[in-house]
């Protein structure tokens, strides 16, 4: 830990990490016991790479995954998903990330259910390292308002696959609407950006990934978890504004600029402050995603 850093330097580290976590749309998991895939994941175009030491790793391989993840973040940027607080692996994972190298951007905490789970992470993580709270259970959904306000928590994420298993919900499209809306409301009420939506299990259907990302965006999500590099581009497309929305937003902003603050009509509708703010948000989202999508399609 950099105990000799000035307050200004510490604030900058924290701000940089938080800004990255808040702006990331696509979050790609890579198994922690497959270090040969880490650089490939980093080169996939994903906004954030998460080295997974939990679900993707067999119990006997946990020490290997931990060692590989920590070796990687000693010099290169990534997030790390540790094992849950109620597991036998949590203490060793926490010891590892507490002394991690400068590349550690954040820690993803699975099975987030209570604000108290984050106290020790807050106390021991290096300066600037953020926490992504992965909510995967009914208790986590019900506790999401307090989780969103817990120390270090910068984003909420939805572990939809585990949630489906736990609740025995079969209709994912309609059965998860309440849980997803609860996460969106909890995040926004706590002043966080929109949460990160869960995975799409199919690996060979890019249209399904884009459709799921679009559905999440419409509900207020601002990111998506991916489990294969092939899902990154389709997920990014799902968060990009349509050509129609982008064209509308441009017209609104141009009309507002020309009106010098007066009320303005665009396409037959009156543009008030919320509509202008939405137009600006669409243009900013286009700016942030256009280059990534172009790179992924070349």
Image (tube, helix red, strand yellow):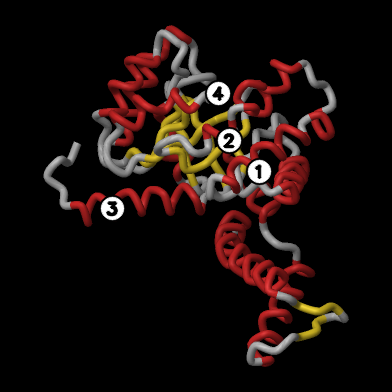
Residue occupied by mark 2? 145
Q: Position of residue 98 (x, y in %)?
A: 28, 28
Give the image quarter of residue 103.
top left
Sequence order check: which comes first, mark 2 or mark 1? 2
Question: Label 2 neighbourhood size at 10 Å, few (<14), some (14-19), many (20+)?
Answer: many
The residue labelled by disc 1 is 185
Mark 4 and 3 residues: CB-CB less than 8 Å, in contact?
Answer: no
Horizontally, residue 137 falls left or right of residue 53, namely right
Sequence-earlier tag: 4 or 3: 3
Which residue carries the number 3 mark? Answer: 11
Instruction: Tell me if label 1 and label 3 are in contact, CB under 8 Å.
Output: no
Residue linked to disc 4: 113
Q: Residues within 10 Å of mark 3 (few under 14, many from 20)?
A: few
Separation of disc 2 and disc 4 at Cα? 10 Å
Res 75 → quadrant = top left
The residue carrying pointer 1 sits among few (fewer than 14), some (14 to 19) or many (20 or more) residues within 10 Å by Cα, namely some
Residue that extends furthest to the right in the rendered view of this protein? 268
The residue lying toward the viewer, choosing from 48 and 4, is 4
Asked if 3 appears above or below 283 in the picture, the reply is above
- Please indicate, yes or no, whether residue 15 appears anywhere in the rendered image: yes
Residue 102 spot, x, y in % from top left: 26, 41
Residue 144 at x, y = what percent?
59, 32
Which residue lies at the image location 64% right of the left edge and 27% below the top edge? Answer: 142
Measuring from the top left, give residue 223's x and y in whole percent. 60, 46
Mark 4 vs mark 3, CA separation in Å: 28 Å
Q: CA distance from mark 2 to mark 1?
A: 8 Å
Please state if 39 lies on the left or on the right of 103 as rendered: right
């Amino acid at each position: 830990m950099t105990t000799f850093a000035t307050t200004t330097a510490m604030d900058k580290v924290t701000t940089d990490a938080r800004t990255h976590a808040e702006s990331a749309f696509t979050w790609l998991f890579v198994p922690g016991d497959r270090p040969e895939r880490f650089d490939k994941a980093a080169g996939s175009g994903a906004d954030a790479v998460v080295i997974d030491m939990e679900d993707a790793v067999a119990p006997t391989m946990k020490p290997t995954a931990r060692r590989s993840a920590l070796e990687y973040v000693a010099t290169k940027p990534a997030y790390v998903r540790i094992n849950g607080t109620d597991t036998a692996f949590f203490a060793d994972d926490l010891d590892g990330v507490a002394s991690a190298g400068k590349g550690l951007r954040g820690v993803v905490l699975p099975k987030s259910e209570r604000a108290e789970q984050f106290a020790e992470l807050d106390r021991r993580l290096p300066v600037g390292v953020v926490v992504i709270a992965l909510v995967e259970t009914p208790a986590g959904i019900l506790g999401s308002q307090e989780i969103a306000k817990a120390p270090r928590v910068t984003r909420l994420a939805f572990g939809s696959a585990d949630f489906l298993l736990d609740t025995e919900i079969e209709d994912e499209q309609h059965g998860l609407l309440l849980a997803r809306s609860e996460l969106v409301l909890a995040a926004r009420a706590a002043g966080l950006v929109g949460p990160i939506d869960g995975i799409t299990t199919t690996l060979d259907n890019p249209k399904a990934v884009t459709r799921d990302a679009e559905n999440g965006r419409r509900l207020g999500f601002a990111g998506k978890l991916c489990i294969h590099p092939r899902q990154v581009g389709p997920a990014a497309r799902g968060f990009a504004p349509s050509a129609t929305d982008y064209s509308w937003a441009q017209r609104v902003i141009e009309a507002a600029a020309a009106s010098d603050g007066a009320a303005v009509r665009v396409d037959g509708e009156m543009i008030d402050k919320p509509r202008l703010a939405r137009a600006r948000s669409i243009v900013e989202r286009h700016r942030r995603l256009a280059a990534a999508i172009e790179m992924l399609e070349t």
